[in-house]
Image (cartoon, grey):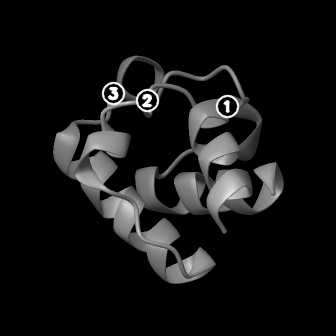
Amino acid sequence: MFEQIRAIICEQLDLEEDAVTMDSDILEDFEADSLDLADLVMTLEDEFHLEVPDEEIENFHTVGDIVRYVEDNA
């Protein structure tokens, strides 16, 4: 699951795969903004056929947070 999500993050934020770890902070480490995060969530929703409530997006700080959410809800 991590590998799939890492690939999506790398593609959307134009990052190298080795720069993305479970502990990477999406906003801090990747200099992403809230629009980047919203685009990322929409892609994850399409890819994994799930719906992420807005209040859950606020809890997405690290890549690990996203991986755990998708694993628990996909």
The residue located at (67%, 32%) in the rendering is 64
Q: Residue 43: horizontal and vertical position, in percent?
A: 44, 72
For residue 45, above or below residue 25 = below
Crowding at mark 3 (Cα within 10 Å: few <14, some 14-19, many 20+): few
Nearer to me, 52 or 40: 52
User: Whole-Å distance between the Cαs marked 1 and 3?
Assistant: 13 Å
Nearer to me, 15 or 60: 60
Q: Residue 28: horizontal and vertical position, in percent?
A: 38, 17
Q: Secondary structure at mark 2?
A: loop
Q: Which mark is residue 8?
A: none
Q: Which mark is residue 30?
A: 2
The residue located at (67%, 31%) in the rendering is 19
Q: Residue 29: horizontal and vertical position, in percent?
A: 47, 20
For residue 29, above or below residue 18 = above
Q: Amino acid at mark 2?
A: Phe
The residue located at (43%, 50%) in the rendering is 13
Residue identified by numbered label 1: 19
Q: Secondary structure at mark 3?
A: loop
User: Whole-Å distance between the Cαs marked 2 and 1?
Assistant: 9 Å
Q: Amino acid at mark 3?
A: Glu
Q: In which quadrant of the rendered view does residue 12 lie?
A: bottom left
Instruction: Say left or right for 16 vs 33.
Output: right
Which of pointers 2 and 1 lies earlier in the amino acid sequence?
1
Tell me if I can see residue 16 in this picture: no
The residue located at (35%, 26%) in the rendering is 27
CB contact under 8 Å: marks 1 and 3? no
Which of pointers 1 and 3 lies earlier in the amino acid sequence?
1
Q: Quadrant of the N terminus?
A: bottom right
CB contact under 8 Å: marks 3 and 2? yes
Nearer to me, 47 or 17: 47
Q: Secondary structure at mark 1?
A: helix
